[in-house]
Amino acid sequence: MKSTIRTTEDKVSIAAQFLFTNWNEMEHKAVYHDDSTGNDFVCESESEMLDLYDLITSDDSDTRRDAYSIWCSQTSHDLL
């Protein structure tokens, strides 16, 4: 049986999992580590997390493969 992702909360959670972290619903943020820079960043934008979800679930395989790079080029997150 295939599950259906329907809610914003589901999508944001999946995007956070892609970053190997969790979306903190109470604080409305995700803290994630970027291996290429060795730095930790914080995303405090639910809409940007939804953008990441859209990239990782794209019908285009190149977009899915490059989702993190595309997302990073379109966002500006604070360094921790």
Image (spheres, rainbow, N blue to C red):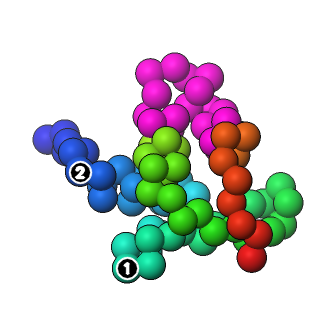
Residue at image position (83%, 55%) is 36
Q: Nearer the viewer, residue 17 or 12?
A: 12
Marks 1 and 2, the one that precedes in the sequence: 2
Question: Is-magenta flag for residue 62?
Answer: yes
For badge 1, the amino acid type reads Met
Q: Which residue is mark 1?
A: 26
Residue 57 image-quadrant placement: top left
Q: Which residues are magenta?
A: 54-71
User: Magenta stretch: dominant SS?
Assistant: helix
Query: Which quarter of the rendered picture does the N terminus lie within?
Result: top left
Query: Which quarter of the rendered picture does the C terminus lie within?
Result: bottom right
For badge 2, the amino acid type reads Thr
Frontmost of labels 1 and 2 is 1
Residue farthest right in this picture: 37
How many numbered dots are placed on residues in this image?
A: 2
Residue at image position (59%, 63%) is 43
Question: Is-magenta flag for residue 25?
Answer: no
Residue at image position (21%, 45%) is 6
Q: Which residue is mark 2?
A: 7
Mark sitting on residue 61: none
In the rendered image, residue 42, in percent from the top left (x then y), is placed at 63, 68
Answer whether residue 65 is visible to the viewer in this image: yes
Left or right: 1, with 69 as reference point: left
Q: Nearer the viewer, residue 2 or 67?
A: 67
Q: Nearer the viewer, residue 30 or 1?
A: 30
Residue farthest left in this picture: 1
Give the secondary structure at mark 2: loop
Give the secondary structure at mark 1: loop
Answer whether residue 15 is visible to the viewer in this image: no
